[in-house]
Every structure is written in C-alpha cells, then in structure tokens.
Image (spheres, grey):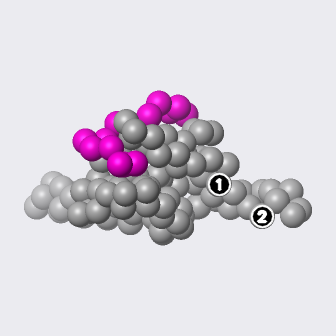
Amino acid sequence: MRQRKRWIMLAVLVAVIAGCHQWWKQGKLVSEQWSPNKQYVVREYKTFEFIPRMTMPGDGGHYSGYMRVYNRDGKQFYEEYSDLLDFIEGPFWAKEGVYWMGNENQDIVRLPTSPVE
C-alpha cells in the first residue's frame, strides 16, 4: 500500500511539473509581424521570469522568450528560445523564408512557399 501511494504521489508531481512547464513555455504574446503577402507570421512570446533581472537605470528591463513562425492557418513551422528577445532585429522576409539577427541561429528559416510574392 505504501509503495502504491509513493507512485501516485510521483505521478501527480510529474503531472504538475509538466503542466507548469507548458504554462511557462506558452508565454505571453508580445508582438507579431506578418509577411508581405500575409501568408506567414512571426510571433514573439515573453516567458515568465522566476528570478527578476537586474538592469541599469533607464535600460527598461530585458526579457526572455520564444520566436515562433506560423502560417496563416496557425500551423507552427519554427520555434527558437532567446535569452534577450528585445535585442533581436527582424524579422526580415526573403524569397526563401524569414530570418532575424542577434540570436544564436543566424540561418534563414525556410518556408514551404515564398513569403514575399
């Protein structure tokens, strides 16, 4: 009986941790920028900071979060986490896809169709 109770407690703990991670990863929508042909959108999501960051006066405070690329039907094509989301420049739309500067991955995110046609 005691062993079963431990397994139930472990299962509940795992479920709570997974739920908290999903809530944290979902983030809060900060901005969205549509492609020139309105087929794709880049959305920036700010995630909750458990430990507030110290910034210089007048700096405004930086935030972490995700950049996600969707088509207009809501299908997600790409996701990338960034520690300093407010320093990233872009998105820049090109014939092959979309890219931005200031993040870890400097490559272009290739999309099924051209976002600038």
Tell me if residue 45 comes above or below residue 111 in the rendering.
below
Q: Nearer the viewer, residue 45 or 91?
A: 91
Residue visible at 24% across and 56% down?
75
Mark drawn on residue 60? 2
Residue 49 or residue 79, whichever sits in front? 79
The image quarter containing residue 59 is: bottom right
Residue at which label 1 appears: 86
In magenta, the rendered stretch is 104-117
Are the residues flagged by discs 1 and 2 in contact, CB closer than 8 Å?
yes
Badge 1: residue crowd in 10 Å (few <14, some 14–19, many ≥20):
some
Marks 1 and 2 sit apart, C-alpha to C-alpha, by 10 Å
Residue 17 % position (x, y): 35, 59
Name the amino acid type tagged 1: Asp
| Residue 114: in magenta span | yes
Residue 4 x/y as whole percent: 13, 58
Residue 59 relative to residue 102: left or right? right
* Mark 2: few/some/many CA within 10 Å (<14, 14-19, 20+): few
Side (left or right) of 9 relative to 65: left
The tally of labels here is 2
Taking depth in this image into account, of 14 and 111 the one nearest to the observer is 111
Q: Residue at x 62, y 47 (%)?
A: 89
Q: Which label is found at residue 97?
A: none
Q: Is residue 110 above or below residue 82?
A: above
Q: Amino acid at mark 2?
A: Gly
Residue under the point 48% across and 64% down: 32
- Magenta stretch containing residue 26, yes or no? no
The quadrant in which the N terminus is found is bottom left
Q: Is residue 93 above or below residue 10?
A: above
Quick one: SS at disc 1? helix
For the question of whether residue 62 can be seen, the reply is yes
Earlier-in-chain disc, 1 versus 2? 2
